[in-house]
Image: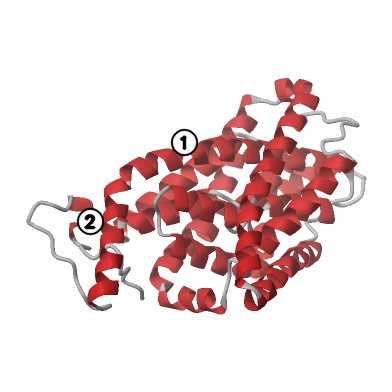
Amino acid sequence: MNFGDTVILHAVDQALLAVMIVVIMFGMGAGLTLADFRAVFRRRRLVAIGFVSQFGFMPLLAFGLAHVLSLEPYLAIALILIGTLPGGSTSNMFTYFARGNVALSISMTTASTLAALVMIPLLLNLYTPYFVKQIGVELENGPEFVIPTANILVSLLLVLVPVAAGMILRHRSRGWAKAAEDTAGFMAMIVILFLISTTMIRHHALVAATPPSVFLAAITLGLFGFGFGYHASYFLGAPPMDQRAISLETGIQNGPVAFAILLLTFPDAAVVNPMLWMTILYSTFIVCSSSIVTLCLRKRGQFDAEVAKNTVVHRRLFGPDYTTRYPDGFLPARIRKDPAQGAFKDG
């Protein structure tokens, strides 16, 4: 693809994006407590499933798609970067609507966000050398192209600053923290939709010039992530509410962090433009696919969620060790082995 002198994100877009990133990460921090970090260890088996899905399958999938679809090097590197990203507060929101285990989703987001400081530079060094070499061949006698992992690490640390600020607010005022948490997800969706719509309208010629393989990569990365997270957790014995959480946490990558990394790390427009374009396409399609998948999971999980609510009420009334009994044949096979459905077996 030839981007020429095209400006993918104007100064106003970048300013809105910067505000959105700060608000999202601040809202995410406002929803976290030290108990959430301790919960990572209590749910270590389920969090480990999510970790393997997040940092094992997704980068490998992105690498495979880039090869199979013969993506141009810059687009391939951007896709791999997206595949290495942690989940974000958006996945927590979709998990809530999908009747998934929100506590597990938050625990996974917490763990993956911290792990990203190590995993993203490590995975980029593992999966991008082939494409970096391709760029070197294209540049010939030009300046050598390298992935500046140190800059990426600095970008990630900067992104985590508002998370820490949000946690401080949560410690001092739960009411304001709750307002910040609720506002962040809603504002993020509004800004993302605005940026996507204006960018698509402004660059309609670029949309028409984008090869089908690029669209396919942007769409299938999230869809395959949903499928892998759901089925991997199913085969490893996770209850249905956990399956829904792990599925959404795997497929929904923290797109705003990708924008932050790209804009802070690659100042050269010729380099960053195709990367930003792939990130915009992924963000566009993940909003659509997440909504569809969430509606399907929500419908499928209605009965499971009602059983879980019953269990929570029963245990408040009769004690934390109370096990709700149901008549034979009442529970479907998918939750028959876990009749409690509200006391998720951690460990």
Q: 157 above or below 10?
A: below
Q: 208 above or below 33?
A: above
Give residue 327's position: percent from left, percent from top.
Answer: 8, 57
The image quarter in which residue 175 lies: bottom right
Mark 1 falls on what kind of element?
A: helix
Give whichever of 294, 272 is nearer the camera. 294
CA distance separating discs 2 and 1: 24 Å
Give residue 202's position: percent from left, percent from top.
Answer: 80, 26
Q: Residue at x 42, y 39 (%)?
A: 295
Circle 2 residue = 335
Q: Residue at x 47, y 43 (%)?
A: 224
Residue 136 in view here: no
Give residue 28's position: percent from left, percent from top.
Answer: 63, 62
Give residue 63's position: percent from left, percent from top.
Answer: 59, 47
Mark 2 falls on what kind of element?
A: helix
In this rendering, position of residue 29 left or right of residue 17: left
Tag of residue 292: 1
Which badge, 2 or 1, is on the more N-terminal residue?
1
Q: Quadrant of the C terminus?
A: bottom left
Give whichever of 100, 118 is nearer the camera. 100
Q: Quadrant of the N terminus?
A: top right
Q: Residue at x 60, y 64 (%)?
A: 178
Q: Residue at x 69, y 76 (%)?
A: 168
